[in-house]
Amino acid sequence: MKTKLFLICSSFLAVIAPVKPLIYVTILAILLDTGFGIWRSVKKNGYASFKSRKLSHTISKTFLYSLAIVFVFFVETYIASDLVAHFIAIELILTKRRKIL
């Protein structure tokens, strides 16, 4: 059971490998936004305005944004590319290699 779970997790990580940099940038942007929000709140109203309840929304925001990026990646890779290829079935001449006789 442990090896099957490891195989499933490693397969999923291999599939989303092209999206990892986008997820990292999103997490970094959310952390920067949170940091500046805390700084601004404390600067404007003092430490009494800092509430951990509002800070807990950061975790759900990070999860939802990352999930949305992965979802759009899957839609583009596995669904939209097939639909576009179905309607536009012209091979690009510049990408084909020519055989020299």
Image: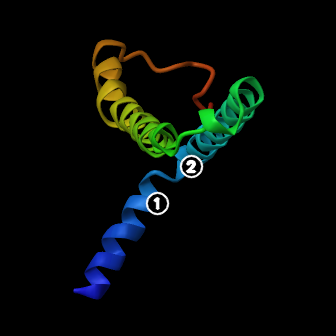
- Quarter of the image with the C terminus is top right
| Residue 15 makes an appearance in the image | yes
Q: Residue at x 47, y 46 (%)?
A: 59
> Quick one: SS at disc 2?
helix
Q: Position of residue 67 (x, y in %)?
A: 39, 41
Q: CA distance from mark 2 to mark 1?
A: 10 Å
Residue under pointer 1: 14
- Residue position for label 2: 20
The residue depicted at 22 percent of the width and 86 percent of the height is 1
Q: Position of residue 39 (x, y in %)?
A: 74, 34
The answer to whether residue 101 is visible is: no
Q: Residue furthest left?
A: 1
The vertical placement of 13 against 94, above or below, is below
Q: Nearer the viewer, mark 2 or mark 1?
A: 2
Circle 1 Cα neighbour tier, 10 Å, few/some/many (<14 / 14–19 / ≥20):
few
Q: At label 2, which amino acid type do we have?
A: Lys
Front-lying residue, 77 or 100 = 77
Residue type of the residue flagged with mark 1: Ala
Q: Who is closer to the viewer here, 35 or 16?
A: 35
**Marked residue nearer the N-terminal end (2 or 1):** 1
Residue 26 relative to residue 90: left or right: right
Q: Is residue 17 above or below residue 4?
A: above
Percent from the top left, x then y, of residue 70? 42, 40
